[in-house]
Amino acid sequence: MIIRLNRNTLFIFWMLAITFFLVSCSSQKKESGPVALTISQEQVSSWVRNFNPLIPGGTSRWPTVAGIYEPLFIFNSIKGEYIPWLATGYEWRNGNLVLDINIRKNVLWSNGTPFSAQDVAFTFQLKKEYSGLDTRGIWKYIKSVDVLNDHIVRF
């Protein structure tokens, strides 16, 4: 089978071929200066077959800790603000040396027991008594945890 091309088709074909050849041979001025290498580090360690969120060093993956132990507040890094979770708000007193946290009402443990300020104080006292649990070193910054009533805890 022989394919015959007319002169116009051959002319267009050869012009395209020459154009592609000339474009590929053209030289571009390369930018001088240091080249920045960006390396994205998504994981800080390899997978560990352990689901203990209290292991120091952050080996447990997100959302392990918040999925098991709900926090008083969640930090929204996009807006740069704290969102109340198990708390409803907070108030600084005495020149920002005392912090009162209001605990959300009508929150229940899985067994139906109401969640209260006593539970928050117990958790912080536990971290004080067993320093291995205080993985963030929070007791370097607070002196005491006091329960003012069922729904207010003071630091």
Image: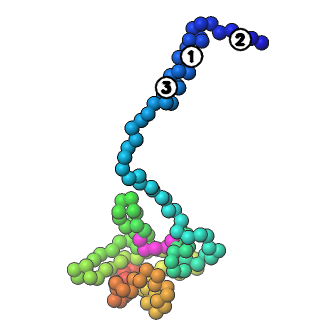
Coordinates of residue 48 in the picture (x, y in percent): 62, 73
- Local secondary structure at mark 2: loop
Q: Residue 22 carries which label?
A: 3
Q: Which mark is residue 153?
A: none
Q: Do the residues labelled 1 and 3 touch (CB within 8 Å)?
A: no
- In terms of sequence position, does the residue under pointer 1 or pointer 3 come before the other? 1
Which is closer to the viewer, label 2 or label 1?
1
Coordinates of residue 145 in the picture (x, y in percent): 37, 87
Q: Distance between the residues labelled 2 and 3?
A: 28 Å
Is the N terminus in the top left, top right, bottom left or bottom right quadrant? top right
Q: Which mark is residue 3?
A: 2
Identify the amino acid type marked 3.
Leu
Identify the amino acid type marked 1.
Trp
Q: Residues within 10 Å of mark 1 (few under 14, many from 20)?
A: few
Which residue does the numbered mark 1 point to in the structure image?
14
- Compared across the picture, whether 50 is left or right of 114 comes to right
Q: Residue at x 74, y 11 (%)?
A: 2
In the image, the segment drawn in magenta is 66-73
Q: Which residue is drawn at 43% across and 85% down?
A: 124
Residue furthest toward the left?
Answer: 95
Up-down relation of residue 64 to residue 148 (above or below) = above
Inspect this view and state whether residue 126 appears.
Answer: no
- Compared across the picture, whether 15 is left or right of 81 comes to right
Identify the amino acid type marked 2.
Ile
- Compared across the picture, whether 121 is left or right of 91 comes to right
Q: Does the magenta stretch include residue 55?
A: no
Q: How is the image coloured?
A: rainbow
Residue furthest toward the bottom?
Answer: 129
Q: Residue at x 55, y 14 (%)?
A: 12
Up-down relation of residue 31 to residue 59 (above or below) = above
- Local secondary structure at mark 3: helix
Q: Is residue 70 magenta?
A: yes
